[in-house]
Image: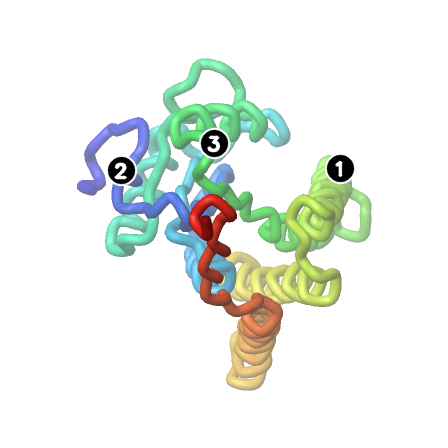
Amino acid sequence: MPASTPATATSSANLKLSEPLGVFGGTFDPVHFGHLRLAEEAIDQLGLGGVRWIPAGQPPHRGAPQVTAQQRLEMVLRSTAENERFSVDAGEVEAAAPSYTVHTLERLRGELGDGQPLVLLAGALEVFWPIGMKNSQGFTKPLWVVVMVLAMCASFGLLSLAVSKRFGLPIGTAYAVWTGIGAAGAGAVGIILFRESANFWRLLFLAMVIIGIVGLKFSHQIHEEDQTPALQPAEAPAPSDQAKS
């Protein structure tokens, strides 16, 4: 999709109904490598058919972004244009009301139907609360303390949903993946935004964290396949008494 197209959403026509669609919302002020890497890892680790990026138009949980909503939408469009597994949704930017996740999910469900699985990339919250803690400067900045606490509570709330009966992720795998995303994402954000060290050893061990996340997800998939019973050939129906006579 060209970066200049002001569409409400890029097409999801190529997405199979059986493939979950990742939903990645945020202010993206600005969008950066950490966001892109997180979305790519989510597709690979969770078996997603794609990720829909949804820039917030009027984020109610923070102060005004540095640039306009249209400029942030344009940055996301340009950053994701070369990845065919990414799509961009301008619904929140074009809306007149503040952006709330629940309203966006209701809109997507109405658009895609009840049969399309949706996966909220909630693990990203594990990246946000360390950023809030860093910017709180020893809990001396009340606004950043509030951001940290809200992100932490939301993260653990969504983790509890992931391991509930509804989704059924094993607690060992879910929590390890959750914290792994936080560790790798916070490391990337620290390097990009806070100019922290990017020496060889740090990058190596961050890569090992990512490899560990992929390994855990892969081992879970193997276990699920092993537990799936093989299909048995259908038995021929017994002849009825009427047929015997």
- Tag 3 residue: 114
The residue under the point 63% across, 30% down is: 61
Q: Nearer the viewer, mark 1 or mark 3?
A: 3
Q: Nearer the viewer, mark 3 or mark 2?
A: 3
In the image: residue 45, left or right of residue 148: left
- Tag 2 residue: 11
Q: Is residue 135 visible?
A: no
Residue 209, how many percent across, how many down?
A: 60, 75
- Tag 1 residue: 146
- Name the amino acid, label 2: Ser
Residue 55, how many percent across, how many down?
A: 43, 35
Residue 194, how many percent across, how many down?
A: 57, 60
How would you rate the neighbour count of disc 1 (Cα within 10 Å): few for under 14, some for 14-19, many for 20 or more?
Answer: some
User: How far separated are the C-alphas under marks 2 and 1?
Assistant: 37 Å
Q: Secondary structure at mark 3?
A: loop
The residue under the point 26% across, 29% down is: 7
Q: Nearer the viewer, residue 169 or 96?
A: 169
Q: Nearer the viewer, residue 186 or 113?
A: 113
Q: Quadrant of the N terminus?
A: top left
- Name the amino acid, label 1: Val
How would you rate the neighbour count of disc 3 (Cα within 10 Å): few for under 14, some for 14-19, many for 20 or more?
Answer: few
Mark 2 touches mark 1? (CB < 8 Å) = no
Answer with mark 3 or mark 2, whichever residue precedes in sequence: 2
Residue 131, how many percent across, how many down?
A: 65, 52
159 is higher (above) or lower (below) than 43? above
- Name the amino acid, label 3: Asp
Q: Nearer the viewer, mark 2 or mark 1?
A: 2
